[in-house]
Structures are given as structure tokens and as C-alpha cells.
């Protein structure tokens, strides 16, 4: 059996999640890890038995023949880690966000188009079993007409943790809450027509309150609610259609109301990170385009455009470019 040679760029906690998923697959060989911090790459290399270890992406690309790269660097460095891989023609999964601005996301998309590399953004909630089933049930009756996406965390705890530099803290919507933005786009299934948002500093020196109403070209309306004023990580979603509504508390379960009845959705032990990786690897093995439910690099651009529109508190008309 031919095994896909995979390189891991970035060796922190998120990378470990990808490596745990990849080690489940018999047709994958993790052949290299890359991180400028020697202790981090050695820790990952030792844990997952990866012999080849590099301090730079350039060295890894020069030293290895890779079928795929999984890029999971610090938030503000994802685009920097993924760009040389795509330029080199290596199929690449880049963690979210695919850049700290639209220009960086577009650069990834354009590099992939030039080299022919396949690319995917790590919005793994698109593969979440509860969300997939909720969407299926709603769309079986007709179009989704209204959505709610919420994602809250603690700025006090985030800042005290010392993980993120000021450029990320000031644009923290692009860190974890961007999952909700991408899901709203994916569930609406349409380009954006209008964005009306409020972004402000309520309790901290960094922006900590976000609220947006998004109107899609197909008429679906979405509401994004995100703040970093709370004490815990909280997320929830609503999906409304014809005589049916799904209410999802977190991504591990929820309820659907239809036909006068209440139906419970539960998480059945599936791993959306592993499902996303499997989907991407199969696209590579079968040499087929990356399609839904995955977030292509082009959809990564659209998500970043919407995020920037929310951050700017301005209208975005005419869809993504």
C-alpha cells in the first residue's frame, strides 16, 4: 500500500490534534515535523515517532518529498507557514485563520492555483456530526432562512495565558470565533449581500464585543454574537427552516423541533478533525478537487472577507472577490 508522506508545520497543541488523527490512518506516514523551537519539534517527533525534524519550512521542503503538509502554527503565522508549501506544489491543510487579513488568504489561494496544489482551511466544524445532521434535517424541508452563531471566551484568561501577541488579541475575532463566522457562511450556502456590525471595547483594552447581522444573497439572515467578556468558552448555534428549528448547545449535542415533536441530537464519538483530515487525504489520493463540506482556500478568502467586514463595521456588497 502506498502511503502519503505528510509533513507537520508547527508542533503545538493544535498540531498534536492533527497528528493524533493522522496516526490512525494506515495510508499515512508522518515523515517530518517542523518548528523553530527545538523542544517543541523534538517533543512531537518523539511522541509520534517522526525522525526528520526541521527548524524552517524551507529546509523541510528542500529535504523531503511531501504529498501533504498540515500547517498549525501560532495564529498570526498560519499564512507564512502555508504559503511556501503551496508554492512548492504540496497539498496543504492550513489551520484557521488562513491569514490575519484578506490579502494573506488570497495569497494562499492564488499560490495554490498557480502550483496546482490542493488546499483546505481547518474549519473542522463543517464536519461535526451534530451540525451535519441538523443541517440535513432542516434542508430536507426547504432552505435555511435564519441562523444564529455564538462564540464566547474570556479575554482575562486569554490575555493572562500569554499565548497570543497583541496583534491577535486586538483581532481575536479571527482566532476561535472565526469558526462561527465560517459556519454561518457554510450553512447559508450563499455569498454575502450586506453586513451590519458593532465592534467595541467594553471591559478590556482589546476589542471584546462583536455583534453582526449578515444578509446573504439567497435571503438567509444570520446573527453573529461573540464576546470575550465572559469567564468560559461557550458556543451555540441555531438553524431555522420551514416548520423546523435546530438548537445546538456547543457542538456535542442539541435538539430539533418539528412536527410538534422534540428530537435529541447527540455526539456519537466521531472526531471532526479526523474526518476532515480523511476527506482531504482522500481528495489527494483520488486526485479530485476539494469540495464541500470542506472549506477550500477560496472559501477561506470569503470567510476572511466577512470577518474583515464585521471588524470594520461596514457593509460588504456584491459578494466575495
Image (cartoon, rainbow, N blue to C red):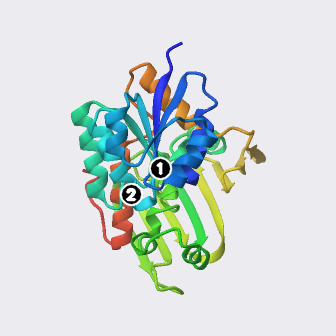
Up/down of 293 relative to 218, above or below: above
How many C-alpha atoms fall within 10 Å of the one at disc 2: few (<14), some, or many (≥20)? some
Where residue 103 appears, x then y in whole percent?
A: 26, 56
Q: Secondary structure at mark 2?
A: helix
On the picture, is 310 further left or further right than 16?
Answer: left
User: Residue beneath label 1, please?
Assistant: 10
Task: Locate residue 263 relative to residue 271 in the image: left or right.
Answer: right
Instruction: Tell me, for residue 268, which label it has, or none.
Output: none
Is residue 171 shown above or below 106?
below
Residue at the spot 36% in from the left edge and 45% down from the top edge: 57
Q: Position of residue 124 (x, y in %)?
A: 54, 45
- Distance from disc 1 to disc 2, alpha carbons, whole Å, reads 10 Å
The numbered dot on residue 77 is: 2
Report how many numbered discs are placed on residues in the image. Answer: 2
Q: Are marks 1 and 2 in contact (CB under 8 Å)?
A: yes
Which residue is located at x 65 percent, y 65 percent?
Answer: 234
- Give the image quarter of residue 174: bottom left
User: Where the N terminus falls, by quadrant?
Assistant: top right
The earlier-in-sequence mark between 1 and 2 is: 1
Residue at the far left in the pictured view: 114
Horizontal arrangement in the rendering, residue 14 relative to residue 34 (left or right): right
Residue 42 is situated, as x and y percent measured from the top left of the image, at 55, 47
Q: Nearer the viewer, residue 207 or 104?
A: 104
Q: Camera-side residue: 259 or 77?
A: 77
Give the mark toward the camera: 1 or 2: 1
- Would residue 120 be visible to someone looking at this image? yes
**Label 1 residue SS:** loop
Give the image location of residue 157, x and y in percent.
61, 75
Residue density around tag 1, few if under 14, some if 14–19, many if 20 or more, within 10 Å: many
Q: Could you tell me if residue 138 is visible in this image?
A: no
- The answer to whether residue 116 is above or below residue 13 is above
Amino acid at each position: 500500500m502506498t502511503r502519503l508522506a505528510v509533513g507537520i508545520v508547527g508542533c503545538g497543541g493544535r498540531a498534536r490534534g492533527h497528528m493524533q488523527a493522522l496516526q490512525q490512518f494506515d495510508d499515512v506516514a508522518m515523515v517530518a515535523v517542523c518548528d523553530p523551537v527545538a523542544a517543541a519539534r523534538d517533543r512531537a517527533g518523539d511522541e509520534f515517532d517522526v525522525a526528520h525534524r526541521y527548524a524552517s519550512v524551507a529546509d523541510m521542503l528542500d529535504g523531503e518529498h511531501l504529498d501533504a503538509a498540515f500547517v498549525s502554527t501560532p495564529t498570526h503565522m498560519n499564512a507564512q507557514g502555508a504559503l511556501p508549501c503551496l508554492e512548492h506544489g504540496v497539498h496543504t491543510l492550513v489551520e484557521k485563520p488562513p491569514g490575519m487579513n484578506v490579502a494573506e488568504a488570497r495569497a494562499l489561494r492564488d499560490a495554490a492555483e498557480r502550483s496546482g496544489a490542493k488546499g483546505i482551511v481547518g474549519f473542522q466544524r463543517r464536519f461535526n456530526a451534530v451540525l451535519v445532521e441538523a443541517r440535513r434535517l432542516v434542508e430536507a424541508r426547504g432552505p435555511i432562512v435564519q441562523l444564529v452563531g455564538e462564540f464566547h471566551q474570556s479575554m482575562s484568561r486569554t490575555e493572562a495565558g500569554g499565548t497570543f501577541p497583541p496583534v491577535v488579541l486586538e483581532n481575536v475575532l479571527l482566532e476561535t470565533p472565526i469558526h462561527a463566522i465560517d459556519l454561518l457562511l457554510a450553512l447559508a450556502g450563499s455569498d454575502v449581500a450586506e453586513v451590519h456590525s458593532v465592534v467595541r471595547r467594553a471591559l478590556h483594552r482589546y476589542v471584546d464585543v462583536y455583534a453582526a447581522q449578515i444578509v446573504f444573497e439567497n435571503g438567509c439572515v444570520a446573527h453573529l454574537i461573540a464576546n470575550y467578556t465572559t469567564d468560559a468558552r461557550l458556543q451555540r448555534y441555531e438553524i431555522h427552516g420551514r416548520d423546523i428549528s435546530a438548537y445546538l448547545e456547543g457542538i456535542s449535542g442539541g435538539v430539533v423541533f418539528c412536527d410538534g415533536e422534540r428530537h435529541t441530537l447527540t455526539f456519537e464519538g466521531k472526531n471532526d478533525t479526523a474526518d476532515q483530515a480523511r476527506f482531504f487525504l482522500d481528495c489527494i489520493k483520488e486526485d479530485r478537487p476539494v469540495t464541500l463540506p470542506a472549506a477550500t482556500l477560496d472559501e477561506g478568502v470569503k470567510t476572511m472577507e466577512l470577518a474583515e467586514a464585521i471588524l470594520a463595521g461596514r457593509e460588504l456588497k456584491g459578494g466575495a472577490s
